[in-house]
Image (tube, rainbow, N blue to C red):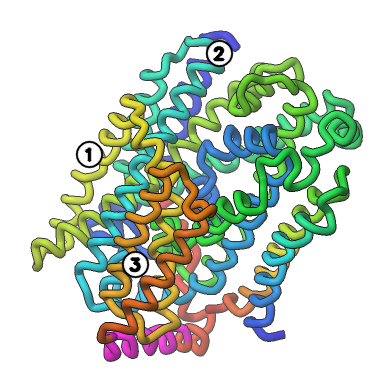
Amino acid sequence: MQRSKWVWLVWAVVLLCYLVPYTLLTDVQAWYGSFLFWTVAGLAVIALNVFITKDFEGK
Amino acid sequence: MTESLIWWSVAIYLLVAIAIAILSRQGKSQDMSGYFLGNRQMNGFVSALSYSATTYSAFMMVGLAGLTYAGGVGALGFEIIYFAGVSLVAIFGPKFWAVGKKFGFVTPSEMLGHRYKSKHVAMAVSIASCLFLIPYAAVQLAGVGYLLQGTTGGAIPFTTGVILATAIAIFFSYVAGIRSVMWTDSLQAIMMVVASTLVALLVIQGLGGFGALFDTLATEHPQSLTVPGSGLFSFVTFLGLTIPWFFFSLSNPQVSQRLFMPASLRSMRQMLLGFLVFGFVYTLVSVLWGFSALAAFPGLASADLATPTLLGSVHVPPVLGVIVMIGIMAAAVSTIDSIMLTLSSMLARDVYANVKPGTSEKRQLIVGKVVIPVIALMALGFAELQLDLIAVLSVAASSGLVAVVPAIIGAFYWKRGTAAGALVSVIGTGAFVLFVYAIGNSFLGLPAGIWGIIVSSVLFVGVSLLSRAPEDRADEFLDAIASQLRIRKTAGVVSEPPLQQAKAGH
């Protein structure tokens, strides 16, 4: 996949970080609510950055 | 915590840190890029740890835990959005790095001045950075003073703590410039992440495990697990907090200057990914501290007491408590020394050398070195005075520094951007943000954090369209990026300076 597509996915994660906890998860009072969502979002950001910077190797 | 345990621990920390600072020296730096950029030869591992230590000030362990204590899980969301914003390094990092190598930029403001063909842009960005970051450093120092005084029951008085932290910051900057700062940062980052994770694990275990902690929260403080929850994190407040921090990696010169330093793009990648892993652990740990304090000590008078209370509790062995306390002091020092170095490089390069054209590199370096303690003493003075204005400037720092973001993005992506646009946007937004803070951080119902990016974008685009763009300069700038990154690609591994060379000094 192209570098720019991974970048767009990061922006999509950011958007979801605003939307989901304030709508779908706003009544889920447990660890598997917003806590888990933002934690997974953090992991997704790390993974996406691995892909975005893949072609930095060898430069 | 006995007084002797505290002082012995401070002494051991200082001994190790001073040894590392001295070992990090690599010949005498004669020029600006040697002293302030480590000759653009920094390796990825040290860069990652230092980037983390510089970004995560004492705010994390005290402030973020306190924010979680007061407002619940929204504090995690706030940090994760900042965290996602660091992806901007993956996008802008190679571009900064390429033009830095090609044109020899030492500071981000110098880069903007060149791109927009205007000394005034470089000067305005430098001065605006000082205006917001010196108070920010001062508040960090004051935080150290209070923390040491509070956790040691007055054994280390406020003034002693503040002076100690300032002296250490000056020393770390002076030994070998950015090299000693980055190596001592690395020590601090490793110590901190290990110690704070241990504390989190011990405390959670003491509270009956992860499941029991969240069960307690769900039954006794159910709102802490949702947003807006108790109301602290209303959506507008959340936006106001997160938007400026999302752009932190571009707007704050003490971290954007780091993009000039890696020895290669591979090192830059290591810096970014290393930081992300570190930051993720650190964020979760800080939030769990806040949650643990909420479950165990729900009735604290102030959320800022969450961390000191936790460290003083029966769940944390005194030695570990002292290590974390010193770690928090070191965290403040590692943020302050980087800010001091960056600001002094900007004042020497972008203000002094522009006011006095023809200033040699050697002369600029001397000016920079003279400015370092001046900035430190200003921060120290502000910390001691505890002025309201300083507190406002510090809180306004993240919103105020966003002023420079449209000009940075425009430098790389919009040829129509002009010096007038950059100047008006930096000065106008800085003034507007301060105005919004002065009237209680709400203008037409929105906080300064949201206004900052809107006002700066409108001013930058609007004024640019009304003025003449330096098209030749824009072409030269963008061509340089293209050719620099292409050369690297075709030359492959051969073009990379040997890692051994970068490590030779250690």
Residue at the disc numbered 2:
B5
Q: Nearer the viewer, residue B405 or B342?
A: B405
- Dot 2 surroundings within 10 Å: few (below 14), some, or many (20 or more)? few
Q: Is residue B228 left or right of residue B245?
A: right
* In the image, residue B475 lies in the stretch drawn in magenta: yes
Three-letter amino acid code of the residue under disc 1: Val
Q: Is residue B190 above or below residue B260?
A: above
Q: Is residue B116 left or right of residue B502?
A: left
SS at badge 1: helix
Q: Is residue B234 above or below residue B323?
A: below
Q: Chain of mark 1?
A: B
Q: Is residue B359 left or right of residue B452?
A: left
Residue drawn at 55 percent across, 58 percent down: B243
Q: CA distance from mark 1 to mark 3?
A: 28 Å
Q: Which mark is residue A49?
A: none
Upstream in the sequence, badge 1 or badge 3?
Answer: 1
Upstream in the sequence, badge 1 or badge 2?
Answer: 2
Residue at the disc numbered 3:
B425
SS at badge 3: helix
Q: Which mark is residue B374?
A: 1
Badge 1 vs badge 3, beta-carbon distance below 8 Å: no
Dots 2 and 3 on the same chain:
yes
Three-letter amino acid code of the residue under disc 2: Leu
* In the image, residue B390 lies in the stretch drawn in magenta: no
Q: How far across and down, in percent of the image, does residue B216 sit?
A: 87, 30
SS at badge 2: helix
Three-letter amino acid code of the residue under disc 3: Ser
Dots 1 and 2 on the same chain:
yes
Q: Chain of mark 2?
A: B
The range drawn in magenta is B469-485
